[in-house]
Amino acid sequence: MAALWHATGRDTAEELVNVPEQADERRAGVARLMGQVLRQQRAEAGLSLRETATLARYDFGWLGRAERGEYLLPENHAAVLDALFGTGGLLVELRRAANIGHTSHLSARLAGATSGQEVMLVLQVQGRSVPVTLSRREFGRLLAAGVLSSAMPGLADADQVDRVAQAINAPARVDTEVIAYFRRVLAEHYAADKMLGPRSLLNPVLAQIDVLDELRRGAAGAHAEPLLQVLSHYGEMAGWLYQDLGQLEPATQWTRRAAEWAQCASDANMAAYALVRQSNIAALSGDYAGVVQLAEAARRNPAGVEPKLLALAAQQQARGLVMLGQTDACFTLLEDAGEALKDHPQVRQPDVPVYLHHYDLATLCEQSAVCYRAAGQVATAAAILQEQIAATPAHLVRDRGHLTAKLAVALATTDPARAATLGLETIATAKQTGSARIWRELRTLDGDLARRWPGHSVAATFHDALASR
């Protein structure tokens, strides 16, 4: 039998939480939240504290301190309690949240509120949902300590929590502040996606869509259309995340749902943007005629449509045309897109899709690299991508990885050693982010190297590394 767990020596010194500095306040907040989860899970299991300690082979006194939030369980002990309660790794993920800088896979959504003194959350990890009830004061402390900042981006204080929670309980109470909250969260997701990739963000986005859809059912009056607009933007984000995971069927389904919600909201920009997104998905399946048709449809009724969106649609149409062999038409459209972005460097309407706020000439230039590569102008494509990589901050891990993989493919024609070396460097990023776009480029690179440079030693090393991922 395993020895009984207990907390002595180094464990006690490290895990007791009673120092009020900022880092220790974060650890203290995690300890209190873990204690609340432990108490609720034990009560649901119908176990006494002593019975739980016996089953977990843990010291009774220290487990009691952990439930009271006075002791921060070590990660290996949290894992055993996760197994006992069937919480799917939630306690382990909470324990890791005590460390500043940890990339959390935990998400949380507001499930409602009571009379105003309590907040009901649903914590989610690895597909497992665990409800937890906290006092409004405790929730505010957790927000202030940053414990839930990655799990619930966009909430600044407990007053905002209360407002959103009350709307969840009574959808007719949806107001502009509640809608603005969900807009802020979406902007946070967009920023996080560039760093983390889709794996960490999909579940939080889907959970928030569930909440928004419930609000939609009860919302009325002047707030119905703005809520539908926000819902359409979340639907498009879900489609994008599925696309980046390589799951094109749900990507298409969510993008089409986004288009439906946009039509209901009379949002011409999102309706056109959804067509561009469907065009982008069509490119991944090799339907280049569809790429052109969908992008052209997005440009068909320009009145009231954001000029940046029309430029994006022209770029997407150009991508399809070059793959169909219509090189001149492709580069004419790219020139048109560039002129539009020069004339309109800023969006005219603040509620356009988040991506358009960041769409600029540099992004268009990066996107044009695929057209130059397809047209046989490999040196130009490589130069563009190298410039973009140099301009991309290191913390945008997913974006840098995708650019590097594309550069490797461009270099495979003339410099197999460097192409394979870049490919080797990018495998780790693909694993970290789960980005199917990066894996797709790496598979293309592997095929190009094998075909053009059979027997090349560095290319063979890259092939073996890719095959063993």
Image (spheres, rainbow, N blue to C red):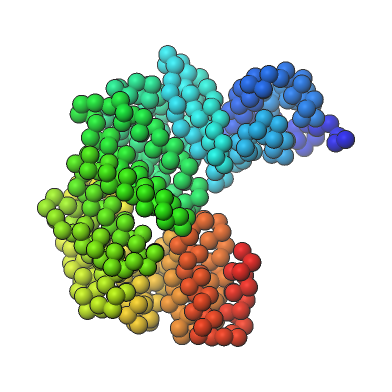
The answer to whether residue 92 is left or right of residue 325 is right
Image quadrant of residue 49? top right
The answer to whether residue 368 is left or right of residue 44 is left
Please provide percent x and percent y for residue 314.
22, 64
Please provide percent x and percent y for residue 178.
32, 30
Q: Is residue 437 above or below residue 410?
A: above
Please provide percent x and percent y for residue 187.
36, 44
Q: Pick the residue in front: 263 or 60.
A: 263
Q: Pick the residue in front: 186 or 362.
A: 186
The answer to whether residue 193 is left or right of residue 355 is right
Please provide percent x and percent y for residue 2.
85, 36
Image quadrant of residue 18? top right
Quadrant occupied by the N terminus = top right
Give the residue displayed 78% in from the left and 27% down from the top: 55
Give the residue displayed 27% in from the left and 47% down from the top: 259
The answer to whether residue 107 is left or right of residue 362 is right
Give the residue displayed 61% in from the left and 69% down from the top: 467
- Taking the view exactly as shown, the residue that stands out farthest to the right is 1
Q: Is residue 31 above or below residue 232?
A: above
Q: Is residue 221 above or below residue 79?
A: above
Q: Is residue 288 above or below residue 241?
A: below
Give the residue displayed 69% in from the left and 38% down from the top: 79
Quadrant occupied by the C terminus = bottom right
